[in-house]
Image (cartoon, helix red, strand yellow):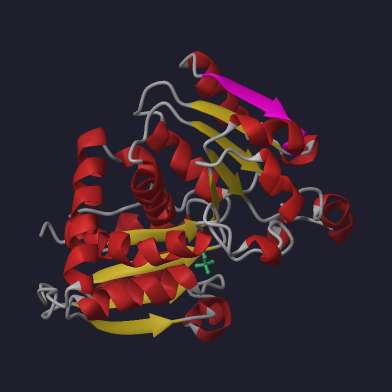
Amino acid sequence: MKNILTTKQFTKEEIEKILSRALLMESDLKEGRVEKLLSDKVIACIFFEPSTRTRLSFETAAIRLGANIISVENAEVSSSSFKGETIEDTARILSCYADAIVMRHNKPGAVEIAAGVSTKPIINAGDGANQHPSQALLDVYTIKKEHGRLDNLSVAFAGDLKNSRPLHSLIPILLFYPNNTFYFISPRELAIPEDLRKELKDKKIKFIETQNLEETLPKVNVLYMTRVQKERFKNIEDYEKVKDLYLLKKVHLELLKKEAIIMHALPRVNEIDHAIDNDKRACYFRQAENGLYVRMALLLYIFGL
Ligand code: CP
């Protein structure tokens, strides 16, 4: 049984197989010839945190592949979790009804606990600030599509690097590829976690931590803006201090290389001015679309298809 809990579980070969499958899904879907390989399956989507892209693209992916969906949004209040049911019992019950479970939870490690008791495969759709593996896979799919490679890149992440599960999930994949340099742009309070810093040092990966967005822009091929995650702050004053530090505006585009791409997992709040949406380097809507193809590939992957 294949769960998808973290990007650290994958080999480079597995990632490349998933990316190739996603490319096939994209062309099949665009040409209207997707095989209904999951027509005998029921997929349960249970989200204890809000979502637009992840839940709806997983559900669309399942429907495109012929599966049926049972879905719970706002599960923290609309499922029996509200009455005190444990995550283990919830997972046990869902695995009696569905053939696979897609779960988002606010607590790091909660989806792994669910997977420990589930008799059906589970996909982690984001667990707190920890991991969001399907996001990272659609991110590398996007980088590969836009740049044609996953090596020899200068990749900058800006914003809330402490709480960004896309960043925490994407770095382990990019470490499979040689000569990538990372720039981490954040205030000290939102810097990358110490375990990631140590891992990069131990592996002798080139990385630069800075607070200066403008100075970094001319150096990168990939600029990944991240939302300051209000929901992870213990008090609102700390959030207010850092929430608007990095806003990418039209004036910044002159500093970026012609071939650079601007990414964002979305939703954005105040990280990217809407005035730059039509710049060809702004690829966050293409990135979100790619989520559908990658999630189709992931649903096939967990069923060994
Ligand atoms: N990127 C992402 O996870 O978006 P949602 O929170 O809308 O699912």
Please state the horizontal and vertical placement of residue 76, each as a whole percent of the image: 56, 76
Q: Is residue 263 visible?
A: yes
Q: Which residues are magenta?
A: 206-213
Give 60 or 234, whichever is nearer the viewer.
60
- Residue appearing at x 55%, y 56% in the figure: 282
Please state the horizontal and vertical placement of residue 34, each as a whole percent of the image: 14, 74
Q: In the image, is residue 130 part of the stretch drawn in magenta? A: no
Residue 122 location, quadrant? bottom left
- Residue appearing at x 11%, y 80% in the figure: 40
Q: How many marks?
A: 0
- Residue appearing at x 12%, y 80% in the figure: 39
Is 201 situated left or right of 132 in this image?
Answer: right
Give 31 or 1, whichever is nearer the viewer.
31
In the picture, which quadrant includes the N terminus?
Answer: bottom left
- Residue appearing at x 34%, y 77% in the figure: 59
In the picture, which quadrant includes the C terminus?
Answer: bottom left
Residue 135 location, quadrant? bottom left
Is 81 situated left or right of 229 in this image?
Answer: left
Please state the horizontal and vertical placement of residue 157, each as a whole percent of the image: 61, 40
Please state the horizontal and vertical placement of residue 137, each as a whole percent of the image: 36, 50
Give 70 or 66, whichever is nearer the viewer.
66
Instruction: Determine whether 245 is above or below 230 in the image.
Output: above
Instruction: Determine whether 104 is above or below 3 in the image.
Output: below
Q: Is residue 247 visible?
A: no
